[in-house]
Image (tube, rainbow, N blue to C red):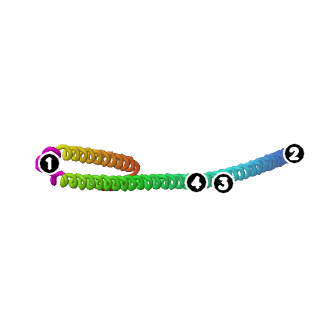
Amino acid sequence: ECTTLQNVIKGLTQTIENQCNVKDENDRLKGTVHILEEKLKACEQEYKDQIEKLMIEIKNKEEDHKLQLTQLHCDTRKKFEIKEAEYREQREKKELEILELTRQMKIQNEEKQNEIIKLQIEFNAKLARVQNKTTKSFSDASVLPQSIYRRKLQHLQEEKNKEIEILRNTIRDLEQHLGKGQNLPLKRRRF
């Protein structure tokens, strides 16, 4: 009976030892779990911080991109406005040149017409004087002045036509040059 009791005590002691060992192992595992949980929390916080940092960076990049786009749009608009003003100024200058050339051509045309009229008057006056002379002197003398004045009149008309053609060509060149820079064609004036 003593041996049985000793065996029971020994078994109980072993059971208690096992329970103590299990408790120690359990405590150790709880400690490990707690450490792992702390590490997990730390990792989660680190990831959250990194994500927040990345989100801030993305937001900042988006803001920078918006600012750059706005600046680019503003710069492009300013350049376009400057070019448009330069083009408008050039067009107005060319139009003024065309108007000035037209005015000069009109003045020259009037001057030539006046000169032709003056020569015609002179010619008619001289012709009338010659006609008052005798028939013989009229037939001898009228041929020469008449042909001279006709030649002079023809020469002046040729000069006038040449100058008019030169001015028309200049105006056409200016209109073509002006037309290359704009879509709306400038109406050409007829002279």
**Residue 185 in sight:** no
Q: Is residue 136 magenta?
A: yes
Q: Which residues are magenta?
A: 130-142
Q: Relative to 52, is 110 on the left or the right? A: left
- Cα gap from disc 4 to disc 3, whole angstroms: 22 Å
Q: Nearer the viewer, residue 113 or 179?
A: 113
Do the residues under discs 1 and 4 have CB atoms within 8 angstroms? no
Q: Nearer the viewer, mark 4 or mark 2?
A: 4
Q: Please report whichever mark, 2 or 3, sits nearer to the chain's N-terminal start.
A: 2
- Cα gap from disc 3 to disc 1, whole angstroms: 112 Å
Q: Could you say whether the residue bearing mark 2 is in a helix, strand or loop? A: helix
The residue identified by callout 3 is 56
Q: How many marks?
A: 4
The residue identified by callout 1 is 138
Q: Could you say whether the residue bearing mark 1 is in a helix, strand or loop? A: helix
Q: Nearer the viewer, mark 3 or mark 1?
A: 1
